[in-house]
Amino acid sequence: MRIAFWGKFVGAVITVYGVLIALQGLFTTLVGVIPGILAYLVGRSIYFSAGHAKAFIYSKGKRVMEVGDILRFAARSFLLIGVIMIIFIVFYGMYLIIVWNYYG
């Protein structure tokens, strides 16, 4: 039951965070919107995964298809988090190269 509650809570918080980051990025640069959109999508995936977990728990194991949906949304969340991490590493590497060339 904890996965249903915490999944919905964390999913909702990440979704709101994604919207706020996207709005902030919209006012600075259009590229700044991308992390917000990705965070929004991660939050939605976690939220939907928790919803399917709750449905599976309340069905007392009769709705086995819910497990497939839980895993599908969890896999989508992991994929998006991986993409965010790759983007972060690339931009951090670019930052280090620029700083190295400027001060070195």
Image (spheres, rainbow, N blue to C red):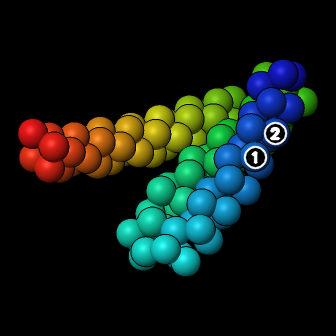
Do residues under tags 2 and 1 come within 8 Å of each other at their CB atoms?
yes
At a point 9% along the width and 39% down the height, the residue shown is 104
Q: Nearer the viewer, residue 72 or 93?
A: 93
Residue picked out by circle 1:
13
Question: Amino acid type of disc 1?
Answer: Val
Observer able to see residue 84? yes
Residue picked out by circle 2:
9
Q: Taking 50 as reference, is 84 left or right?
A: left
Count of marks placed on residues: 2
Circle 1 Cα neighbour tier, 10 Å, few/some/many (<14 / 14–19 / ≥20): some
Q: CA distance from mark 2 to mark 1?
A: 6 Å
Q: Nearer the viewer, residue 24 or 46?
A: 24
Question: Amino acid type of disc 2?
Answer: Phe
At a point 67% along the width and 62% down the height, the residue shown is 20
At a point 35% along the width and 43% down the height, the residue shown is 88
Observer able to see residue 72? no
Q: Position of residue 74 (x, y in %)?
A: 56, 35
Tell me the element at label 1. helix
Q: Taking 58 as reference, is 47 left or right?
A: left
In the picture, residue 73 is in which quadrant?
top right
Q: Position of residue 57 (x, y in %)?
A: 84, 26
Residue 97 is tagged as none
| Pair 2/1: label in front | 1
Circle 2 Cα neighbour tier, 10 Å, few/some/many (<14 / 14–19 / ≥20): some
Identify the residue at the far front of this view: 103
78 relative to 88, above or below: above
At a point 45% along the width and 66% down the height, the residue shown is 32
